[in-house]
Image (cartoon, rainbow, N blue to C red):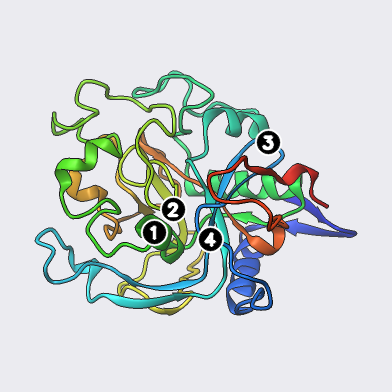
Amino acid sequence: MIRARWGYQSIPWSFSTSVGLLIAILAAGPGFSADPPIEPGRVVLNSIGMSLTYCPPGTFLMGSPDADPDRKPEEQPQQTVEITQEFFLGTYEVTQGEWFSLMQTEPWKCQPGVREDPRASVTYVSWYDAQEFCQRLSQHEGKMYRLPTEAEWEYACRAGTTTRFSFGDDAAKLSEYGWWGSTAEQGTARHEPYTHRVGLKRPNPWGFFDMHGHQWEWCQDAYAAKMPGGRDPFTPGDHKSNRYIRGGGWCHVAVDCRSAYRPSDTPESKHIDLGFRVALGRDHAKISRTTRAGSTPVSLKSRP
């Protein structure tokens, strides 16, 4: 068990604690309505140099329409989802360097499909491992980091779009945005079947990199037979529940990299192309409103 210090109160970290805090945050409703809106794409840096990009509250259609020829049953029917809480999400997937700086371990060491590089995505980490990273980062910063909910992930991936990918419906453009297709001997990973540095491809409209392909990404939610909708949907499950993974990976075909594709995996699974990115509520970020999207990121380290 990890203990995190928030102000003057010491909180014992556990599975139930992290899920309970997330449920409390989602249930609290909008907390910043008195402030002027912040545009999507504003970036901050935390104390270990992680880049986080702003996502505003909003409403979107989650899942795939009938017109998508590659739709899966678990992507339908589409659900209207309202994200009431603004939040920050990792601009990139968590890297080997960021992982090692907190965890002092190298789960990818000597594993296939890995090029050791501090700027390459971390792989071979389970959902439990991702939870521990978030808890240690929370302890280090005094802010609550967590995995994104499945709805938050798709909301950030779509970035205001309604197409199959955040760049449109044409899968032929996927190579401009992600690494994919190794096992099918196609795509950008055909001749480069390994984890790459983050941010080498084009970002989505809100400035997130590697949302399509490269690494599958753990989400907080447990598997549910029916796709959730409504306000801030979240399925907590228990410590043994399968967890959703999103985004596709460099081993997989283009249709698996669509915004709506939502497979799940056992929480103890560790794979060649499975990583994660972290989420942070803006109330904990204490972001300066003078920073503009595309400008030099604000450092969270200097914030009170």
Residue type (three-letter) at the residue carrying disc 1: Ala
Residue wearing tag 2:
206
CA separation in Å, label 3 and label 4: 24 Å
Residue wearing tag 4:
39
Residue type (three-letter) at the residue carrying disc 4: Glu
Residue wearing tag 1:
159
Q: Are marks 3 and 1 in contact (CB under 8 Å)?
A: no
Residue wearing tag 3:
48
- Location of residue 12 (image quadrant): bottom right
Residue 233 position (above or below residue 174): below
Which mark's residue is nearer the viewer, 4 or 2? 4
**Sequence-first disc among 3 and 4:** 4
Q: Which of 248 and 124 lies nearest the eye of the viewer?
A: 248
Q: Secondary structure at mark 2?
A: loop
x, y percent for residue 104: 65, 28
Q: Is residue 292 left or right of residue 190?
A: right
